[in-house]
């Protein structure tokens, strides 16, 4: 429970920071790039190189979406990026059923789910407030 509360607070602080630096146009999209890398780094730290590679492969859609939407102006990008954050949250919840990564701390999936859920939900809310739901116009 405490992991979820701290994760939600980190998500809210990320949103505050993005708004403060006027980085909403790119920060959430580039943030998608970090998500698979964190799980891969846990595997590499545990000496599980094959698992780290699998984590990166599973993360390719997040990396591609992050790169595309960080630099390209697309209608509905806030919705798509928000959905990717929510999908990663779901990935966090089922991660241990998909991949055995002994390097992942026990608290991390719930914490990351909460961060992802807060940011993804915010982006869906934001999509209704920016023209064409385009993050580049946020």
Image: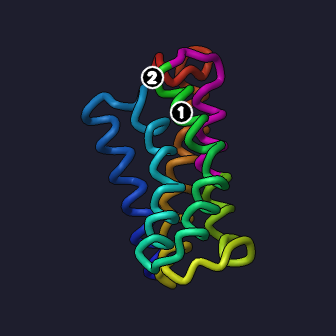
Color theme of the render: rainbow
Residue closest to the eye, 65 or 83: 65
For label 1, the residue is 126
Give yes or no for contact between labels 2 and 1 (Cβ–Cβ under 8 Å). yes
Seen at 53% across and 36% down, the residue is 66
Question: Is label 2 in a helix, a strand or a loop?
Answer: loop
Answer yes or no: is residue 58 visible: yes
**Magenta span includes 42:** no
Q: Is residue 91 above or below residue 99?
A: above
Task: Give the CA separation, mark 2 to mark 1.
Answer: 8 Å
Q: Earlier in the sequence, mark 2 or mark 1?
A: 1
84 in magenta? yes
| Quadrant into which the C terminus falls | top left
Q: Residues in magenta? A: 72-86
In the picture, the disc for residue 138 is 2
Picture coordinates of residue 17, whole percent (x, y) = 29, 43
Q: Where residue 57 sits in the image (x, y, percent)?
A: 64, 53
Viewer-closest of 55 and 73: 55
Q: From the viewer's perspective, is residue 68 above or below residue 92? A: above
Residue 10 image point, x, y percent: 37, 60
Does the rendering let one see residue 107?
no
Residue 45 placement: quadrant: bottom left
What residue is at 48 percent from the left and 75 percent from the top? 108
């Amino acid at each position: 429970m405490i992991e979820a509360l701290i994760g939600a607070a980190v998500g809210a602080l990320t949103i505050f920071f993005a708004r403060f630096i006027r980085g909403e146009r790119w920060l959430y999209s580039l943030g998608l790039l970090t998500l698979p890398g964190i799980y891969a780094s846990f595997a590499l730290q545990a000496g599980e190189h094959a698992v780290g590679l699998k984590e990166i492969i599973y993360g390719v859609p997040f990396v591609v979406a992050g790169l595309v939407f960080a630099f390209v102006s697309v209608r509905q990008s806030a919705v798509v990026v928000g959905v990717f954050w929510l999908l990663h949250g779901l990935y966090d919840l089922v991660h241990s059923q998909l991949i055995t990564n002994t390097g992942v701390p026990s608290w991390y999936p719930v914490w990351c789910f909460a961060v992802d859920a807060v940011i993804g939900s915010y982006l869906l809310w934001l999509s209704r407030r920016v023209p064409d739901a385009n993050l580049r116009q946020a």
